Amino acid sequence: MDSFLRKELLRDTVYCLSDGRKDRELSCRKAKFYIQMVMISVFSLIVIGLAFVLSTTYSLSLHKFGNPFVLFGRQFLWVVVGIVAMLVFSRIDTSVYGKFVKFILLFGILISILPFIPGVGKARGDAYRWINLGILNISSSEIVKMVLILYISVVLSRKKDKSNFLNVFLPIFVVSVLFFVVVSLQLDVSMAFLVLVSSIVIMYVGGIPPLQVILTVLVSFFFILLFGEKFPYLQNRILAFLDPWSDPFGRGYHSIYMVKSFQNGVFGVGVGNGSIKEKYLPEAHTDSVFAVIGEEAGLIGALVVLTLFTTFFYYSLKLAVEVEDLYRSSLIVGFSTVISVWAIVNIIVNIGLLPPTGTNLPLLSYGGANMVTSLAGVGIIYRCYREFSTCRKDT
């Protein structure tokens, strides 16, 4: 009898171990598929972006530099730098951010203040958004958004009781509102809202009570109203959105021609053959690259871009659920949200459903800072997958 019980116990143990092993293998296969879809969508967007950066900058480079490939070459270089950043961050253990979170936060605060310091910050008009490093200028808000995601993810992962006001919500609230206000005062309200949205999404996913999340939004909006006189251009953009034809050659000019770009049928006029980008869109290679895609690649091109961004975000969220770890999930959700929400805002602006915001299209538009930080974020997402799959194999 005793021998029979031992045999039954041994058999049940073998079955449990076998089922557990199968579950781990299935989970790893799912995660591998999700990250593959994320990476495929990212690199597909980069390739499309390079094609349309060449299309939108060809004449501009020829006129400005006497060489039609100068701006395209710079963008290609930024893509290479971004891929290097992605590889670097994909090799950094995510636990490092937890160990140095205070230094990371202090670095973020310093970076957010530097644009206001004479000789260090570089202004364009009334906007103080850039740090002058001599050979290049860095957008401080691009770094701030990464710092905020890392900080919130670390704080949430360290506290079990997410409803604790003083130890969990208050530090996240203070840092989120601080960065929102500072970036807004740089006259980069669009990026400030992106920073706010990213923090709200991570807070909600991380288990912060909804009322506390709403409080963060209300206080942030209060500061916008408090410093409202510093943002006179917001009124012009809203008026241009509500009635662009009231001033078609002034504040409504950009909005009108972005929408007109989407009037060329299913296949468009052909890549490189668009005319609106040269005559009517002042920032065709940055703010309005999706409008150029609409004109030159038509409905098909626009849908391909939308599908790729949707694929990126959807499978990033699937991966965040699969890793079953709040810290890694928060990192994945944070960095995928930054890219995806930014893309959604730019696309909605280009089709005329939001006022012009001065935002670029992540992974597609011309520009170095956003390309590098976006790919660095993708590197962190990939690192979360690697840590999860390694942990699963070892258990």
Image: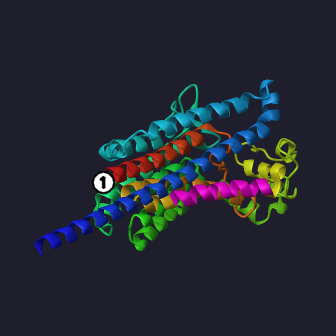
Q: Quadrant of residue 43?
A: top right
Q: Residue at x 72, y 55 (%)?
A: 304
Q: Height in image: 1 above or below 208?
A: below
Horizontal arrangement in the rendering, residue 289 relative to residue 266 (left or right)? left
Looking at this rendering, what residue extends furthest in the bottom direction?
Answer: 1
Residue 388 horizontal/vertical position (percent): 39, 52
Q: Main secondary structure of the magenta part?
A: helix
Question: What's the amino acid at mark 1?
Answer: Thr
Q: Nearer the viewer, residue 230 or 297?
A: 297
Residue 1 horizontal/vertical position (percent): 12, 75
Element carrying mark 1: loop
Q: Quadrant of residue 349?
A: bottom right
Q: Residue at x 36, y 51 (%)?
A: 393
Say whether residue 360 is visible: yes
Looking at the rendering, the stretch of residues picked out in magenta corresponds to: 300-317
Q: Nearer the viewer, residue 172 or 380?
A: 380
Residue 180 horizontal/vertical position (percent): 49, 54
Residue 40 horizontal/vertical position (percent): 60, 48
Residue at label 1? 395
Say whether residue 255 is visible: no
